[in-house]
Image (cartoon, helix red, strand yellow):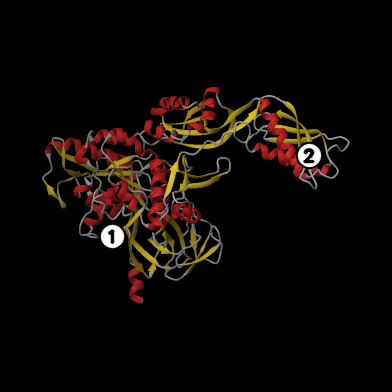
Amino acid sequence: MGNNSRQQTEIRPRNVAIVGPYGSGKTTLLESLLYVTKAITRKGTVEEGNTVGDSSPEAKSHLMSVEVSCAYTTYEGIDFTFLDCPGSVEFIQETYNALVGAGTAIVVCEPIVSKVLTLSPLLKFLDDWQIPHIIFINKMDRAQDEFSDVLNAIKSISSRPLVPQQYPIKRERDIIGYIDLITEKAYHYHPGQAADLVPFPEELKEAEKAARQEMLETLADFDDHLLEELLEDIEPSQEEIVKDLTQDLADDLIVPVLFGVAKEDYGVRPLLDCLVKEAPEPNITATRRGLKLVEEGPVIAQVLKTYYSSQGGRLSLVRIWQGKIVDGMTLMGVENNTPVRVGGVYRLMGNQQKSLHIAETGQIVALARLEGVATGDTLTDSQKPIQPLPKAPVIPPVYAQAVSPENKKDEVKISGAITKILEEDPSLRWEQNEDTHEVILWGQGAIHLQVTLERLKNKYNLTMVARNPKVPYKETIRKSTKVHGRYKHQTGGHGAFGDVHLEIKPLPRGEGFRFLETIVGGVVPKQYIPGVEAGVREYLQKGPLGYPVVDIEVTLFNGSYHPVDSSDQAFRQAARIAMASGMPKCEPILLEPILLLEIFTPSDFTSNVLQLVTGHRGQILGYEGMADWKNWDRINAYLPQAEMQDFIIQLRSLTLGVGFFHWRYDHLEVVPEKISSQVLAAA
């Protein structure tokens, strides 16, 4: 046990999230990192569905990451945990949740200027959370643009200065190697091997000198001593340069840039060396999260992801900020004060699990059976109250489908299965819509919901049918009327008698429903008046156009009763008869819900987005540049809910996939006559 403990304390963990847009090659990079460090003996491919990441049936089916995958390896005495994060904007919640526990992020992108903008939301999140990050420009063998042009494009969207550490060596348009700007040594790539040292290419000497000088000048902005050396033409030592890079990256002041071809392992070893030398240690990240780490202090951990296996087993991927977690120990969920017993400690390699007895500060591990603890929650064994750690905000859903089981017998399984699905993916939401009587599943897009339905089938044998949800239209009236309703029924014994006179009036928009009575002389006894109101309310659930009625006032002003045959139920029926007779005379009209949208878009696409809004019967309320986001605009607009279904799809199509919006219900508005006719005809 003593030896075990000593080995554990010698662990030097680093937690690295691999992030980037869809198609940039993150999972391929993970495969290469694991292969180069000998964690695996054979590389898989996304196309063959045999990679360590993307091991779920849904990921294999769609050839894309749909949830965070975890893998680990050791390199140069450092224990690396890699989190392979989805690139699709529809699964970005997974990425944000994982980044909260990462010490460093590798941002993977392609060498294509037109695609650089897709990094923008990711870089914004990294900057807001002050997460040190390194950019790895992948697929350099397919570069469509000059390296300098790609760098300039990234600079235009990064709030931190870029510090390229390499300069490309090309033969015509093909990348064949690189120059290390720190050591000024040149290397050529070889498939499946480390790059070998080659004579410095004289034709690149001038370009390399300029690139290196730019790197040093950027570092000198944060180091007065280096600045003095540059001003006095003193060559700084390599040790000083690496020290500056390490310090500035840890402080999230700069963004180092490297490149390569992950599929061929090109540039992967220099990337690993960069992580070894420059990536911050776990305590630095903890300090940035506001934690004051204490020797022998209590356990402080945070859930980054919740998994359910197809057998129903629950695993929580957890970052340990402080302390040690042992199998069988009891932890407390800080947010809900719930004690949970750890039912197993594991390291994850894709879908494979390795059992551990103990996990220590800085590690990311999976804990079994933490029932009632949600993604983002903080865990501790402290007897004193502790402050919950900050968690990634939940992204509001923007796309909906009405869902129902293919087999009616499966209705009893829906609630339990969807509850687990929502625990795995907090960016989903479901509701039972009272107006349309549909079960609505909300998410981030069509593929997001498609993957969710596939999970329900694969994990819980629950096949669901999906369709576009109905719009919760309402109706109201334009005119007033007075109406008489009488209910009289004789069955041999006691009869039933109720008699009412009602006045129906429209109310201003948003007033809802108001019931009044002005009965004089007891012509309708007080005990029957609630029955009249109940009858009116029952009728208003479905008006003459077939929708719930709102913004209406009904006044009971006269009536009559029978001392024996009258009852609450009889007056309820009389009120319904009166309403059914009077409402069609009040010029009923259809109302639609109007949403208030806050749309976020790169400024280059603002004019197109404005046209998109007006093309969906929207009303522009105004737009302005965003002070905290360079070259982005915020647009405020009203949009009919009937026009929202595919709005997010078209918005993303116009904005390279990065535009997004937040929304909330605002008010009801009269449906234009032409559209109203179409809606009523279809209904």
The three-letter amino acid code for the residue at tag 2 is Gly
How far, Cα to Cα, is label 2 from label 1? 81 Å
Q: What residue is disc 2 on?
A: 498
User: Circle 1 sits in a helix, a strand or a loop, which is it?
Assistant: strand
| Residue 107 in the image, given as x and y percentages of width and height | 32, 45
Q: Residue furthest front?
A: 492
Q: Earlier in the sequence, mark 2 or mark 1?
A: 1
Decide which of 345, 279 is in the foreground and name it: 345
| Residue 678 in the image, given as x and y percentages of width and height | 51, 27
Decide which of 172, 643 is in the foreground and name it: 643
Q: What residue is disc 1 on?
A: 73
| Residue 53 in the image, given as x and y percentages of width and height | 30, 53
How packed is label 2: few (under 14 Cα within 10 Å), some, or many (20 or more)? Answer: many
- State the residue at coordinates (69%, 24%): 479
How packed is label 1: few (under 14 Cα within 10 Å), some, or many (20 or more)? Answer: some
The three-letter amino acid code for the residue at tag 1 is Thr
- State the residue at coordinates (38%, 61%): 365
Above or below, 153 relative to 195: above
* CB within 8 Å, label 2 to label 1: no
Q: Which mark is nearer the camera, 2 or 1?
A: 2
